[in-house]
Image: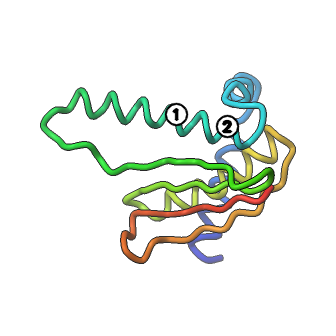
Amino acid sequence: INESDFFDKLGQELISTCCTDRMERAFKCLGGNLEEFLATLDGVHDVLKYQENSNDEDHPESEAAFICNALDDSHLHLDFTTERPAVAYLLVGSLKAVAKILYFTDVEITMTRSSDDKRHFSLFLLA
């Protein structure tokens, strides 16, 4: 098994393991479908990033990103940055499990990594 497949499966297993009763209800509060779920996470990320930057005046605003946009009814585009590529593959698996467990949807996810900035990843989700 290659590294990306391993982290994809691990991400799926993490969500499957933790997504029981209370945690599943909490996750479902984030949205009625995968698009709403990711849009809510996008908003939460913005708030947390703002709070972190306003509390840490010695450091300029970080370049962290987590931005989700709907391309059409069945396609989503997620841009995000991470210093650790393994996190990107964990996210792919986690999103597959979230879609399946919470929204009874199978998704195909294609991930690309920027050649200009190795921290930048783009995910295209087809539901």
Q: Which mark is residue 43?
A: 1
N-terminal-most mark, 2 or 1 = 2
Residue at the image position 46 percent from the left and 64 percent from the top? 85
Label 2 – label 1 distance at C-alpha: 10 Å
In the structure shown, which secondary structural element does the residue marked by tag 1 occupy?
Answer: helix
Count of numbered badges drawn on the protein:
2
Going by the numbered disc 2, the residue's amino acid type is Phe
Residue 30 sits above or below residue 120 on the image: above
- The picture quadrant where one finds residue 22 is top right
Going by the numbered disc 1, the residue's amino acid type is Gly
Q: Quadrant of the N terminus?
A: bottom right
Q: Front-most of 8 and 56?
A: 56
- The picture quadrant where one finds residue 114 is bottom left
Residue 39 sits above or below residue 9 on the image: above
Residue at the image position 58 percent from the left and 48 percent from the top? 68
Q: Front-most of 90 and 112?
A: 112
Residue at the image position 65 percent from the left and 50 percent from the top? 94
In the structure shown, which secondary structural element does the residue marked by tag 2 occupy?
Answer: helix
From the top left corner, tell me how far across and down residue 8 is, in percent. Answer: 64, 62
> According to the image, label 2 marks what residue?
37
Q: Front-most of 3 and 58?
A: 58
